[in-house]
Image (cartoon, helix red, strand yellow):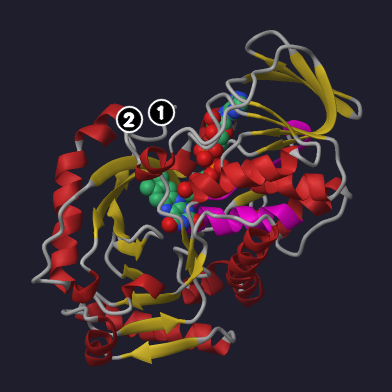
C-alpha cells in the first residue's frame, strides 16, 4: 500500500538520516519487530531495555511509512470524546485510555531526555474549540467529563480565546494543560540509532513475506529468501495491517497537511499550543520546532493513493479556508503540502494485543489522531506480553472487542 504522497515535510526537512543493511544471512533472536516507523522504534527501545536480543526489519527505509507524513501532535485527547467513549466502553476503560495517552506524553518527554533527542519535543497546551454554535452544548459536556476525570482543563469563552490566542469566530472551547509535539520521523531514527549501540540489529529494505509458526518460535521468511528465527514477533506494520488481517477493524482515511513559515506576531502563544476544532473532519494545527505552522485536515475515506493525491490542490484550499475562518486577515503561503493515509476505529482506540491467527505474536497498531501516544502505551503492553502478563487496557484494545 502507498501510505503517503511524494513530499511530506519531514522527509524533505530531515533527508535520509540513516540507512541500514538489508538482510543477507539467516538470523535468530528473542524478538523480531516488523516495521520501523515510530511504533516499531518505540517497541524496539522497550525490548532492548528489557534485555531481549531484538531485530527490527522494514521493507522500506526507516520511517518512510506514515511516520514521515504525520503531524505528530501528542494529545491525551482521543478522537472520540471522553463522554462518548464512556458510553461506548464504560467509565473505567474510557478514563484509563485518556490517562494512558496523557502518561504517554510524559514518557516521550522522559525518553527524549534519556536519549538526548534533537527531535524538538515540546510540551504544549491544547485548545479544542467549538467551530459552530451547535457544538457548544456537547463540548461543555465533554469539558465536565474531563474535569470529573481529573484532567487539567479550563473552559474558555470566545472572547477569552480571542484575547489569549487571537482566534476569531470560535464559540468557546476547552483549554487543556497536557499536550506536546515532536518530529516523529527524526525521533524514530534517534531511538533506533541509540538502541543499535545497545545491541539492536536493524535491516531495512527487508520485507517479511510469510511467517511459519512452530511450537515456541516463528520463522519469518523475507522476500530475499533469508529468514529470521524469533521466539516472538511484534507486528508494528501500521495501516498496512489492513492487508494482513482480514477482519474489518479499521476504516482507512486520506488526510492532508500543509506547512508554511509563520508570522509569529500575527498569532498569540501559538508556539506553545496544539489547536483542533469540532468540525467533521476536524482542523488541527501546531508549530514546528523550526518555526513553521503545520495544519492538517480534510479527511475523507481512502479510495486508493491516486485518488488521495489527486485531491491535494483542493484539500490545500479547504484547509486554508478553514484557517481563514479563525484568522481572517492572515495570508498563508504554502511551502509544503502532502497527503497521508491513516486509520480510524469505531471507538477511536488502537488494536494492541494478540491475534488468534498469529501464534507467538503481538500487534501494536496505533490508530487515529493519537496513533503515536497509543504506540507509547503499546511499549508497556508489549513488555507485559513478553512476560505473559496482561495490561489493564488489554481488554479495551484487543482484537474482536
Ligand atoms: C497526515 C497524518 C497526520 C497524522 N497526525 C497525527 C498526530 O497529529 N498525532 C498522532 O499521534 N498521530 C498522527 N497520525 C497517525 C500517526 O502518524 C501514525 O499512528 C504513526 O505514524 C504510525 O506509525 P507506525 O510506525 O505504526 O506506522 P508506519 O510509520 O507506517 O510504519 C510501519 C512500517 O512497517 C513497515 N512494514 C509494513 N509491512 C511490512 C512487512 N511485511 N515487512 C517489513 N516491513 C513492513 C512499513 O514499511 C512501515 O515503515 C497522523 C497520520 C497522518 C498520515
The outermost residue toward the top is 225
Image x and y of residue 361, in percent: 76, 36
Q: Is residue 374 left or right of residue 363?
A: left
Residue 2 disc label: 1
Q: Is residue 46 left or right of residue 110?
A: right
Q: Is residue 244 left or right of residue 380?
A: left
Secondary structure, mark 2, is helix
Residue 3 in which image quadrant: top left
Q: Residue at the spot x=29%, y=41% of the render?
A: 338
Secondary structure, mark 1, is loop
Residue 171 in which image quadrant: bottom left
The answer to whether the beta carbon of the residue marked 2 is less than 8 Å from any atom of ligand 1 is no
Image x and y of residue 380, in percent: 75, 57
Q: Residue at the spot x=36%, y=80% of the render?
A: 139
| Vertical order, 107 against 351 (above or below) | below
Q: Residue at the spot x=32%, y=30% of the render?
A: 305
Q: Taking the image as drawn, is residue 67 in sight?
A: yes
Q: Specify whether residue 373 is painted magenta.
A: yes
376, 13: nearer the viewer: 13
Give the Cα separation between the discs numbered 1 and 2. Answer: 6 Å
Image x and y of residue 224, in percent: 65, 9
Q: Specify whether residue 138 is painted magenta.
A: no
Task: Tell me whether circle 1 and circle 2 mark residues in contact (CB < 8 Å).
Answer: yes
Q: Count of labels shown?
A: 2
Residue 322 in which image quadrant: bottom left
Q: Taking the image as drawn, is residue 344 in sight?
A: no
Image x and y of residue 71, in percent: 40, 53
Residue 305 disc label: 2
4, 142: nearer the viewer: 4
Part of the protein shown in magenta: 357-380
Q: Is residue 126 left or right of residue 259?
A: right
Quadrant occupied by the N terminus: top left
Amino acid at each position: 500500500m502507498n501510505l503517503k504522497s511524494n513530499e511530506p515535510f519531514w522527509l524533505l526537512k530531515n533527508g535520509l538520516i540513516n540507512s541500514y543493511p538489508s538482510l543477507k544471512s539467516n538470523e535468530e533472536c528473542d524478538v523480531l519487530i516488523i516495521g520501523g516507523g515510530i511504533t516499531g522504534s518505540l517497541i524496539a527501545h522497550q525490548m532492548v531495555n528489557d534485555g531481549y536480543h531484538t531485530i527490527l526489519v522494514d521493507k522500506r527505509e526507516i520511517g518512510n511509512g506514515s511516520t514521515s507524513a504525520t503531524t505528530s501532535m501528542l494529545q491525551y485527547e482521543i478522537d472520540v470524546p471522553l463522554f462518548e467513549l464512556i458510553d461506548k466502553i464504560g467509565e473505567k476503560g474510557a478514563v484509563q485510555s485518556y490517562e494512558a495517552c496523557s502518561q504517554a506524553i510524559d514518557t516521550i518527554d522522559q525518553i527524549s531526555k534519556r536519549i538526548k533527542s534533537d527531535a524538538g519535543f515540546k510540551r504544549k497546551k491544547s485548545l479544542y474549540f467549538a467551530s459552530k454554535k451547535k457544538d457548544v452544548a456537547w463540548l461543555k459536556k465533554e469539558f465536565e467529563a474531563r474535569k470529573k476525570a481529573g484532567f487539567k482543563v479550563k473552559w474558555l469563552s470566545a472572547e477569552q480565546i480571542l484575547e489569549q490566542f487571537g482566534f476569531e469566530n470560535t464559540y468557546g472551547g476547552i483549554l487543556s494543560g497536557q499536550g506536546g509535539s515532536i518530529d516523529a520521523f527524526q525521533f524514530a531514527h534517534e531511538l533506533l540509532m541509540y538502541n543499535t549501540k545497545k545491541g539492536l540489529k536493524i535491516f531495512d529494505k527487508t520485507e517479511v513475506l510469510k511467517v511459519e509458526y512452530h511450537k515456541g518460535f516463528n520463522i519469518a521468511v523475507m522476500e530475499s529468501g533469508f529468514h529470521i528465527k524469533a521466539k516472538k514477533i511484534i507486528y508494528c506494520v501500521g495501516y498496512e495491517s489492513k492487508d494482513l488481517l482480514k477482519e474489518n477493524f479499521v476504516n482507512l482515511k486520506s488526510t492532508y497537511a500543509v506547512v508554511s513559515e509563520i508570522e509569529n506576531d500575527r498569532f498569540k502563544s501559538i508556539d506553545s499550543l496544539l489547536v483542533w476544532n469540532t468540525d467533521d473532519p476536524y482542523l488541527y494545527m501546531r508549530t514546528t520546532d523550526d518555526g513553521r505552522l503545520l495544519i492538517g485536515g480534510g479527511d475523507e475515506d481512502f479510495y486508493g493513493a491516486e485518488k488521495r493525491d489527486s485531491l491535494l490542490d483542493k484539500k490545500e484550499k479547504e484547509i486554508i479556508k478553514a484557517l481563514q475562518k479563525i484568522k481572517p486577515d492572515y495570508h498563508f503561503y504554502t511551502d509544503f503540502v502532502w497527503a497521508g493515509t491513516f486509520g480510524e476505529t469505531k471507538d477511536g482506540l488502537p488494536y494492541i494485543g494478540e491475534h488468534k491467527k498469529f501464534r507467538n505474536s503481538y500487534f501494536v497498531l496505533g490508530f487515529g489522531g493519537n496513533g503515536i501516544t497509543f504506540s507509547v502505551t503499546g511499549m508497556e503492553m508489549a513488555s507485559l506480553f513478553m512476560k505473559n502478563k496482561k495490561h489493564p487496557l488489554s481488554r479495551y484494545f484487543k482484537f474482536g472487542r
